[in-house]
Amino acid sequence: MDTTNHIKLGKTDLTISSIGLGTMQWGDVLVPQNAGSRLDPVVQAIYQTSLEMGITFFDTAELYGSGRSERHLGMNLHGKSENLVIATKFMPFPWRLTKGELKTALIKSLTRLGLKRVELYQMHWPFPPLPIKAWMDAMADVVAEGLVQAVGVSNYSAQQTEMAQNTLAHHRIPLASNQVRYSLLDRRPEKGGLVEYCKRSGITIIAYSPLEKGILTGKFSPDNLPTGFRAWRYNRTFLMKIEPLMHELREIGIKHDGKSPGQVSLNWLVAKGAVPIPGARSVAQAKENAGAMGWMLTAEEVEKLDRASQTYL
């Protein structure tokens, strides 16, 4: 298998592109709730471009835009997902008090996606009051019914991941993945032991926010500050602090035929064994993301970036 372009999803039979597409932004597009909703041309272009660039893994969730993201993805899929791996998520809201709620929510997600089965179904957060075991038992039920092919979790700690894995093991189902926030500017999954545990257990790490709201693309600098909701966190002091890291990203990118800081950042995650799922609001961004596939950082370059981002470990 060409690991620069594809990766096995955990211990399942599924193969996915080494970089996926996160579709949370598609929930921002206001889509009517009726089945004949108009397909947004920008979203359609992003989807088609991603396919053409080799992306085969698309991640969404019922929570994104109250189902709008799923509906947009479904309108692009046209009821077919051959050669693709579609992932969505179940949110264990505190008012969902029985494990039967999971199947009910799954059916609604499948309806929005226009699919009879989803390849990867993930528990969005490890929220109470129901314990992890109850939800994993519910996951096993929908796998047995053929509605789900593989099971994943999201935002689970190493200990919670182990609990989920052990419960699924009783049903002879492997835990395929754990989707967490992970980037050069947020290496908490490494510090908390999650990355090591997943690597040892054959669980794929799916990395969301891999570009930190665009900060790692190199678009912003101390002289070109972001605006809006990003401004309070990614201020001038912060951007000055990460300048040594951005310098390394630029220098390494030059050595790989002019790859951008964002592409190097995504490739660093691939080198770590993770599958980053950046979002895209334009065709240009979709092409930029996919350009992180097809090549690989050297071990020395990964080590340089590790040192440059040590503050965020």
Image (cartoon, rainbow, N blue to C red):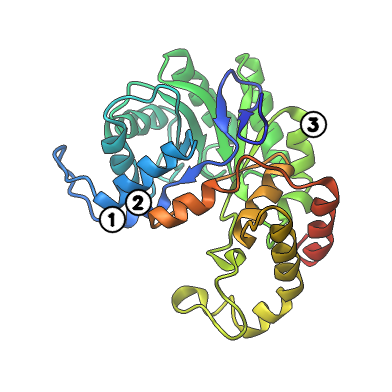
Give the spatial CA distance, label 3 vs label 2.
34 Å
Element type at marker 2? helix
In the picture of the structure, the residue carrying the numbered disc 1 is 29
Tell me residue 127's x, y (percent): 54, 46
Is disc 3 in contact with disc 2, using a CB cutoff of under 8 Å?
no
- Which is more toward the observer, 54 or 122? 54
Q: Which residue is mark 2?
A: 26
Q: Residue 295: where, in percent of width, then height? A: 67, 42
Q: Is residue 278 visible in the rendered structure shown here?
A: no
Tell me what residue is drawn at x 84 percent, y 53 percent: 303
Up/down of 47 relative to 261, above or below: above
Q: Secondary structure at mark 1?
A: loop
Identity, as a three-letter code, of the amino acid under mark 3:
Arg
- Does 109 sit above or below residue 149? below
Residue at image coords 65%, 78%: 239
Label 2 crowd (10 A; few <14 / some 14-19 / many >=20): many
Which quadrant, please, contains the N terminus?
top right
Q: Is residue 81 left or right of residue 40?
A: right
Secondary structure at badge 3 equals helix
Q: Is residue 125 positioned above or below 233 on the image? A: above
